[in-house]
């Protein structure tokens, strides 16, 4: 049982890290979308230069920001990380797995949108992935708390008042 708790704790921590990376990618996608909308056809080629056989999405824009092709690759890498977290889940994480599957599907959708340069749709899919991961992490935390005999978070069962005094005891 101790082993399962460690695995669940690692999964929660891994999801926290992954959510931070997903949030960062979503921010960069959003900035790329803003840059795309702001272009009037006068953007300069990226560091690769125009004659190196790169398409515009694989280049960097004039601010050194990654193009949509590298964003799509980054999204794929994040999905791979998610798969690793899911593989590490014990039976204790089964009820969180559905949400993580949903997060994986949203990541796939975001990657496809990035590859086709649909940045607005990609940002929405990335947000969906974040929401699914957050809910799954909360489910894992509830499972871990229940396993450790603590009151679950957010289910209305609270053993402490807001001032963290034990209820029902002689304080």
Image (cartoon, rainbow, N blue to C red):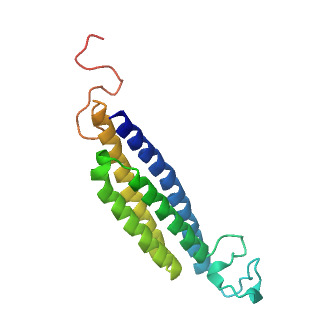
Q: Position of residue 133 (x, y in %)?
A: 39, 55
Q: Position of residue 3 (x, y in %)?
A: 38, 37
| Relative vertical location of residue 81 with respect to residue 108 in this rendering, above or below | above
Visible residue check, residue 165: yes
Seen at 63% across and 75% down, the residue is 67
* Count of numbered badges drawn on the protein: 0
| Relative vertical location of residue 105 with respect to residue 97 in this rendering, above or below | below
Seen at 44% across and 67% down, the residue is 107
Residue 148 horizontal side relative to residue 31, left or right: left
Q: Position of residue 140 (x, y in %)?
A: 34, 45
Residue 47, picture quadrant: bottom right
Seen at 33% across and 38% down, the residue is 144
Q: Position of residue 118 (x, y in %)?
A: 49, 80
Seen at 35% across and 23% down, the residue is 164
Visible residue check, residue 39: no
Residue 12 horizontal side relative to residue 157, left or right: right
| Relative vertical location of residue 170 with respect to residue 42 in this rendering, above or below | above
Q: Is the N terminus in the top left, top right, bottom left or bottom right quadrant?
A: top left
Q: Is the C terminus in the top left, top right, bottom left or bottom right quadrant?
A: top left
């Amino acid at each position: 049982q101790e082993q399962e708790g460690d695995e669940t704790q690692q999964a929660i921590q891994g999801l926290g890290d992954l959510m931070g990376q997903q949030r960062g990618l979503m921010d960069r996608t959003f900035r790329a979308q803003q840059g795309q909308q702001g272009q009037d056809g006068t953007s300069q080629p990226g560091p690769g230069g125009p004659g190196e056989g790169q398409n515009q999405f694989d280049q960097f824009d004039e601010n050194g920001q990654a193009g949509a092709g590298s964003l799509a690759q980054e999204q794929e890498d994040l999905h791979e990380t998610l798969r690793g977290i899911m593989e590490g889940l014990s039976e204790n994480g089964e009820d969180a797995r559905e949400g993580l599957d949903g997060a994986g599907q949203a990541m796939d959708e975001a990657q496809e949108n990035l590859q086709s340069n649909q940045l607005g749709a990609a940002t929405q899919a990335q947000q969906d992935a974040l929401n699914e991961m957050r809910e799954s992490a909360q489910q894992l935390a509830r499972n871990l708390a229940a396993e450790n005999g603590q009151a679950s978070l957010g289910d209305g069962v609270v053993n402490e008042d807001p001032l963290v005094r034990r209820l029902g005891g002689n304080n």
